[in-house]
Image: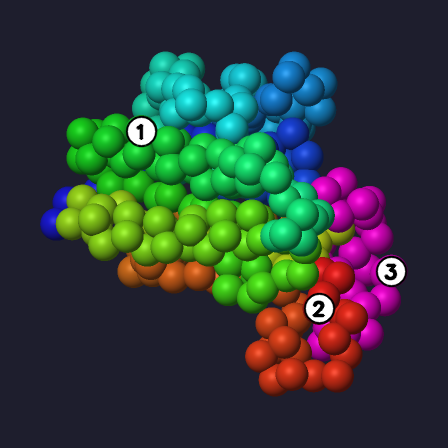
């Protein structure tokens, strides 16, 4: 088995805001140089990069479209500007809100392209590099509690996230001999733009259907991602870490607060 310490150089997709930004900033605090990705010249990505630099780390911004067949090229760009790569975190993705019977093929393909094809392409390219590099590494894919729990009106999203969880486990098996760990982080309802909440709402919004009674904060997800990227997680691979305040426990036990998890 390959031993060694992977370089503190990270690519974080979807890092212009939300969980991705929080992850980029945490990794910067822990000494990682970071490539931030921008979709359609999002100025927020430049803001994330500035915040990374404020923490004493190097930051670069590269364009990235998770739904593009060329999505994997961002890994090559990251390797070029960073001078190597040790960590890939896939956060970028999209969602939708239609029942399966009302979902057209174009929507289905768009969601699977962004939420599954993109991570496949970046994981494949990063894995090839990390194997060639010979120093091990970390891949973390951000899926969702809906990797395992169905959500009404989100067939394509659930299918893509379930696929991402399965892909992560296969990669974990295939890359273990090279000292590369692959894990998933599955957030529940987190206060982000995607869920229509400001970050600070995490501690003020009430969620009676959730055991902790509130949405999650982006830093609460980033902290788990950061752990998985660190030497502290050197013996953790092929796992899914659920970060949902206990939401999935309610669904698993058929709790009568159905609306709480149905709307998560």
- Identify the residue under disc 1: 125
Q: Is residue 19 left or right of residue 160?
A: right
Colour scheme shown? rainbow
Q: Which one is in front in this view, the residue at disc 3 or the one at disc 2? A: 2
In the figure, 95 relative to 39: above or below?
below
- State the image quarter where residue 46 is shown: top right
Q: Is residue 195 magenta?
A: yes
- Residue range in magenta is 192-217
- State the image quarter where residue 146 is shown: bottom right
- State the image quarter where residue 150 is shown: bottom right
x, y percent for residue 93: 57, 38
Residue 261, numbered label: 2
Q: Look at the numbered disc 2 and give the secondary structure of its residue.
A: helix
Q: Is residue 151 magenta?
A: no
- Identify the residue under disc 3: 204
Q: Is residue 137 left or right of residue 142?
A: left
Q: Name which residue lies at 75% across and 62% down.
A: 263
Q: Is residue 138 left or right of residue 179?
A: right
x, y percent for residue 145: 57, 61
Q: Name which residue lies at 36% across and 15% down.
A: 80
Q: Name which residue lies at 54% across and 17% down.
A: 63
């Amino acid at each position: 088995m390959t031993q060694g310490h992977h370089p503190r150089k990270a690519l974080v997709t979807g890092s212009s805001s939300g969980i991705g930004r929080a992850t980029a900033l945490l990794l910067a605090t822990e000494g990682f140089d970071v490539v931030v990705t921008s979709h359609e010249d999002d100025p927020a990505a430049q803001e994330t990069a500035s915040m990374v630099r404020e923490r004493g780390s190097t930051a670069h911004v590269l364009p990235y479209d998770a739904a593009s067949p060329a999505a994997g090229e961002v890994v090559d760009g990251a390797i070029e500007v960073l001078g190597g790569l040790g960590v890939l975190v896939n956060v970028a993705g999209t969602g939708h809100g239609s029942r399966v019977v009302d979902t057209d093929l174009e929507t289905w393909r768009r969601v699977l392209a962004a939420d599954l094809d993109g991570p496949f392409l970046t994981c494949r390219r990063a894995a090839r590099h990390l194997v060639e590099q010979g120093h091990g590494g970390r891949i973390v894919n951000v899926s969702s509690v809906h990797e395992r729990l169905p959500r009404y009106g989100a067939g394509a999203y659930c299918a893509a996230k379930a696929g991402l969880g399965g892909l992560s486990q296969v990669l974990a098996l295939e890359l273990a001999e090279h000292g590369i760990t692959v894990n998933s982080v599955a957030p529940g309802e987190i206060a982000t733009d995607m869920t229509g909440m400001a970050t600070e709402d995490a501690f003020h919004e009430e969620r009676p259907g959730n055991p902790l009674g509130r949405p999650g904060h982006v830093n609460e997800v980033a902290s788990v991602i950061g752990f998985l990227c660190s030497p502290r997680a050197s013996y953790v691979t092929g796992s899914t870490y659920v970060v949902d305040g206990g939401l999935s426990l309610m669904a698993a036990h058929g709790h009568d607060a159905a609306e709480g998890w149905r709307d998560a």
